Every structure is written in C-alpha cells, then in structure tokens.
Image (cartoon, grey):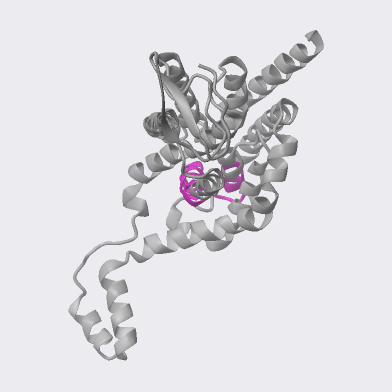
Amino acid sequence: MNVNYEKNTFIACSREKGEEPFYYVKKKRATEKGVCMSFIELLKVILLGIVEGITEWLPISSTGHMILVDEFIKMDMTAEFKEFFLVVIQLGAILAVVVLYWGKLWPFYIRQIPKKKREQLASKNPVSRVILTFVEKFCDKEKWILWFKILVACIPTIVIALPFNDFIEEKFTNYVVVAIALIVYGVIFILVENYNKKRKPACTSLEELSFGTAFKIGIFQVLSVIPGTSRSGSTIIGGILVGTSRTVAAEFTFFLAIPVMFGASLLKLIKFGLAFTPAEILTLVTGLVVAFFVSIIAIKFLMGYIKKHDFKAFGWYRIVLGILVLGYFAGKTFLV
C-alpha cells in the first residue's frame, strides 16, 4: 500500500489486507512497505552487526567495510535512520568491552578500612573525614586513575575533532578518501612494526601508562576522524610509537572507545529523536545484540593474536582492501 508520510501525521500500514492507522511518528522516515521487517531484512541487519563487531576492534576500518556492504547489500530503511543505526550499534561493541574488562574498569568496591587508617581519618575535620572515608572504603584508586587517563586522552578529540565532525563526514565520506586512508595506514602499520622491532616498550602495563602518554595517544585518535582511518588503528599506532606494548596499546584503545563511542551515539540519538517504529526498534536491538557477541569474539581474538604476532598482517589487509575499493568504484564509475 502506498502512503504519503508527512511530519507529525498518522501513518497507515497494512496489516496483511486490512488498512488501519496504528502508530504515530514525528519524523518522515517510514518506508512504503510499512513497519513489518522481512526475514531477508533481518539477515541484512545481522550481517551489519557482524561487520561492526569485527571491524570496530580490529584495526581495519569499519567505514571501509561498511561502504562495501552498503554497495552490495541495500537496506530497506531511510538514509536518516541508517546513519543513526550504524552509529548506535556501536553501543553493542562498547558493552562487549565493559563485560570483558569489568574487573579492570569498575572503580568501586567495599572493603574494611584498616585500624591505623581509621585513626588517621578521625583526626580530620568532619567534611574531610566523610569524603576520605568514602574514598577509602568504596573507591578503587587505581581504577579511578585509569578513568582519568581515559578522559585526558579524550580531550584532543573533544577540542579538535568534534567541532568538525559533521563537516568531515559530509565532505570526505567517499570511496576515494576511504580507499586512500586504508592504503596509507596499512603502509604505516608495516613501517611502524619494522621500526618497533628494535625497540623495547617503555610501558608494559596500564598502571605504568602516564597521563602524558595517554594524551599523546588521544592526539592520534583525532586522525580517525578521516573516514577509512580506523579509530582503533590510529590509537594502536599512536600507542606503539609513544612507547607502549601492543597489549597496552590495544587495551587502552578499547577503553578509550567507551566515552568516545557512547558520546557519538548519544549525539545521534539527540539529533534523531526517540520516535521509532516497531521495525526500527527490532533493527536496533538485533544490530546491538549481534555486534555485542561478535565484538567479544573479535576482542578475544585480537588480544590472543598480538601476544605472538605484530600488526603487519592487518597492514597488508588494509592495503589489499583499499586497492579493491578503489579499483571497484573507479571501474564502476568509468563503465557507467
């Protein structure tokens, strides 16, 4: 049934053969097929969740892969909702990090304060005593320090990248930029690993990671604003160059993604609104769940892989993918 969708109007959708207006939306984004998701569309959403879960954490660029997926698998959704969906399913990937690294990230606990420490606290003024007692009893200081390092690393992105994010997305999200970024950073990965062969990492644990080093890694994260760069790729390269081990670079990259990706999803949600059709809700939930489980597998694979190998294989993969993307779309352009 063909219907016109105007802002702030009821939408009619056929339930089999009947015609009945049954829900209300605020934005013009429903499709002519109504709100019922087909099995084929569900499979497409699952595939996108798989691609997101793998490419978000491996340093191979989720944008580059999404461009290819979008070329061959057309989703039955509006451009507005699709843009929102591709950002929001990252929450599933974030949740995977939180679950896997809960012990390293959760900054609260309950413990008994030693007698000597209680005596020291008793000599403080009432306000200081209450605050310090709370900190001693409930706060894991090492984990709070880690979170402050993460926040420090986010500063360059907030100050430099965020103000220009929409402009860069509009002007640079195309196959040429993505392909070049894939190739260039693939070459950089290989060069960095060759350079790193003769070096010993100065930082081999998150506790040894200084605030200055965290900030430098954050500067490298700014590079990921260019489509095709890979957020994890740029921060891992940055971590290795400033002296961290591969394990520390990868783990800090995972943790750094939590506020960055959560913030990006929140901004998209505010921009898009909360009025979803049933089909859109099913799409979001399916994508989130699939991205979550696939991300767990991808993260475990990466952490196991880098214990015995370097990142060169990912560099070569990026180069090959970049050439394929450039060749395919260039050939398509000339043939049309």
In this rendering, is residue 108 above or below 57?
below
Q: Is residue 8 left or right of residue 323?
A: left
Name of the residue lying farthest toward the top: 335
Q: Is residue 59 visible?
A: no
Q: Is residue 155 left or right of residue 139?
A: right
Q: Which residues are drawn in magenta?
A: 236-259
Q: Nearer the viewer, residue 157 or 241?
A: 157
Q: List x then y, in percent, for residue 180.
A: 73, 29
Q: Nearer the viewer, residue 258 or 214?
A: 258
In this rendering, is residue 223 above or below 181?
below
The secondary structure that dominates the magenta segment is helix
Query: Is-magenta flag for residue 242?
Result: yes
Q: List x then y, in percent, for residue 261.
A: 51, 45
Q: Residue 39 falls in which quadrant of the image? A: top left
Q: Residue at x 59, y 21 (%)?
A: 70
Q: List x then y, in percent, for residue 23.
A: 42, 34
Quarter containing the C terminus: top right
Q: Nearer the viewer, residue 157 or 87?
A: 87
Q: Looking at the image, how many numbered discs can be counted on the residues?
A: 0
Query: Is-magenta flag for residue 318?
Result: no
Q: List x then y, in percent, for residue 188.
A: 68, 35
